[in-house]
Amino acid sequence: MPLSTSNEDYLKTIWNINEWQATPVTSGQLVKTLGLSPSTVSEGVARLSALGLVRHAPYGAVRLTGEGQQEAARMVRAHRLLETGLVQLFGYSWDEVHDEAERLEHAVSDLFIERLDHKLGHPARDPHGDIIPAPNQSEVPRQIPVTLATAEPGTTVHVKRVSDNDSDVLVYLEGAGIVPGIAVTVEKSQSDPQLLAITLGDVHAIIPLAAARAVVTGTADA
């Protein structure tokens, strides 16, 4: 039986959170991320548990089962390929694609997604730098992030991912040239603790620390 849109959103959200933290997902995180009430999330998790897609002890962590991981990966793959297609094929900017992909992902078929993947040349990451799960993938890739905001002064890091949680931040970072693949050198701390001095190539810039927290970094080959 096909999953409901709500069930798919829960599974995708659990996967997304699991990618970026070492600890299990909590109901409180789902409440915050999905923007729902605790009682609504509790009911949603109970439905997934009844379907055998998650394991959840009362007041405990929410963990995907093997089947739950497969369904979650399918939704994440669809979402990220749609975002990539919207940018590459239809000229969307990276701050526009998240909500559009949210609407489309529940309507398109698996066949459409596989043909889209082929059309795009089998991309490994979406426009924000998030890993696109492979077909039939079930294991969540663990990528405990280090952000630009926490990089040591004097070090050069490579932008791996930019959070798409805030479209205004995406617009700002793109305007500043801070996109996946770019190298950034962190300069000495500013007198204002809410600002960060950086260098991109020969360009010096000062950016808000709040924006730097949305930028996940790593070494060139990480």
Image (cartoon, rainbow, N blue to C red):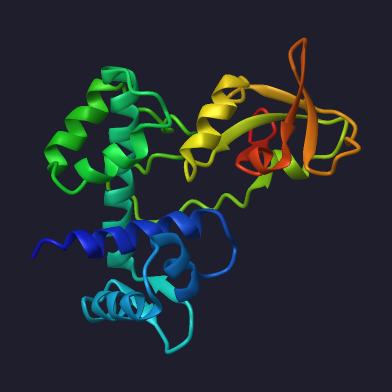
Q: Quadrant location of residue 198? A: top right
Q: Quadrant location of residue 135? A: top left
* 206 vs 148: above or below: above
Pick out the residue farthest to the top. 202
The residue that appears at 58% across and 59% down in the rendered structure is: 21
Q: Nearer the viewer, residue 43 or 166?
A: 166
Lateral position of residue 76 relative to residue 214, left or right: left
Pick out the residue farthest to the left. 1
The residue that appears at 49% across and 60% down in the rendered structure is: 18
The residue that appears at 42% across and 28% down in the rendered structure is: 94
Residue 139 in percent (x, y) is at 41, 56
* 42 vs 169: above or below: below
Looking at the rendering, in which quadrant would you find the N terminus? bottom left
The residue that appears at 34% across and 29% down in the rendered structure is: 84
Q: Nearer the viewer, residue 131 or 175?
A: 175
Residue 13 in percent (x, y) is at 39, 58
Lateral position of residue 217 relative to residue 191, left or right: left
Q: Nearer the viewer, residue 40 or 50?
A: 40
Q: Quadrant location of residue 153? A: top right
Lateral position of residue 209 relative to residue 179, left or right: right
Camera sees residue 122: no
* 104 vs 201: above or below: below
Residue 49 in percent (x, y) is at 28, 79
Q: Nearer the viewer, residue 106 or 175?
A: 175
Residue 142 in percent (x, y) is at 54, 53
Looking at the rendering, in which quadrant would you find the C terminus? top right
